[in-house]
Amino acid sequence: MKKRYLAGLLAMTMSLLLVACGDAVKPVEEQQEIKQEVVASSENNGANAETSGTTTEGEATKDNSTQESQEEVELFTGEIDGFVIEQGNLLEYRGEATDIVIPEGVRCIAVNAFSKNIITSVVFPKSLTSVGTRAFSNQTELTSITFSDGVSKIYDQAFENCTNLVSVTIPASVNSIGKKAFQGCKKLESAVILESPEHADLIIRSIGDYAFRDCKHLKLSIPDSITDIGQDALESVTVYCNAGSYAEQYAKDNFISYEYMPE
């Protein structure tokens, strides 16, 4: 009787301990089930981690877009040596120098950016992609332009009436020369439009209307990559081109003087 009483008391005590500890003490079978669940969960997490580490093409594009957006946000805004820049766009020049070197980081030169200045020479940075409408128009003292490879567009009237400009080399990266871009550059004698296999997708495609009109002393070298030349773009110009090129046919159709480039 006493043994039964002690056994009952011991069983009651164990029950109370199990209730008090909650999930701290579990049967062996349940512990094994939990262990199996933990292992399965760990394997699933590993698979998920591996999956999340795999970047799809769409995700890569999204990441690239995000990175590009961040780069756009980080474009410089402020003033450097008199150059007023906003988000990589050069808005105006407040300095007094006439021979200017535009700072790296400038992506675009805005419309009429130098309308209040007298410029005699300009060197463009590698970061530049476009020269805006009338950016340097009527700069009658401008004699030298140095482009960097990377510019893709020269907009309308960008260098119109730069009457003392003698020569210019337009890089292979440029794919569009706007309307009247060099119109009225009366002393312009030599202009070379470069073509390079390094820019197979960025080669010049078009010359806008009146782009080189009234450049009476100009000898203009045009590569085979030109596929569109606008109205009166080469009026009074002597064209250097290759036999069978679009430029040759344009010259013939518009009674423009032309010569073949030396081989």
Image (tube, helix red, strand yellow):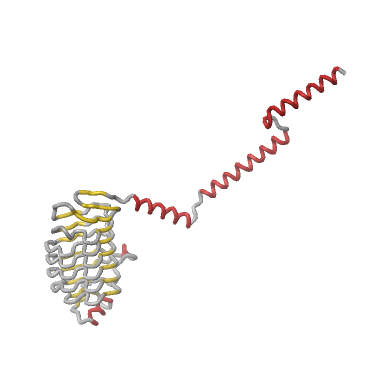
What is the total number of numbered labels drawn onto the structure image?
Answer: 0
Task: Give how far across and how far down residue 259 sits, in percent.
Answer: 19, 76
* Identity of the residue furthest to the front in this view: 116
Q: Is residue 65 above or below residue 203?
A: above
- Judge by depth and name the residue closer to the eye, 83 or 146: 83
Q: Is residue 148 above or below residue 28?
A: below
- Judge by depth and name the residue closer to the eye, 157 or 259: 157
- Residue drawn at point x = 22 percent, y = 57 percent: 124
Q: Is residue 126 above or below residue 164?
A: above
Task: Give how far across and how far down residue 177 sits, in percent.
Answer: 25, 68
Tell whether 243 sits left or right of 49. left
**Within the image, what quadrant is residue 108 found in?**
bottom left
Task: Give how far across and how far down residue 44 sits, in percent.
Answer: 60, 45
- Judge by depth and name the residue closer to the eye, 77 or 97: 77
Q: Quadrant of the N terminus?
A: top right
Q: Is residue 37 above or below residue 9?
A: below
Tell whether 63 sits left or right of 164. right
Tell whether 56 sits left or right of 178. right
**Within the image, what quadrant is residue 258 found in?**
bottom left
Task: Give how far across and how far down residue 135 sits, in percent.
Answer: 21, 62
Q: Quadrant of the C terminus?
A: bottom left
* Identity of the residue furthest to the top in this view: 2
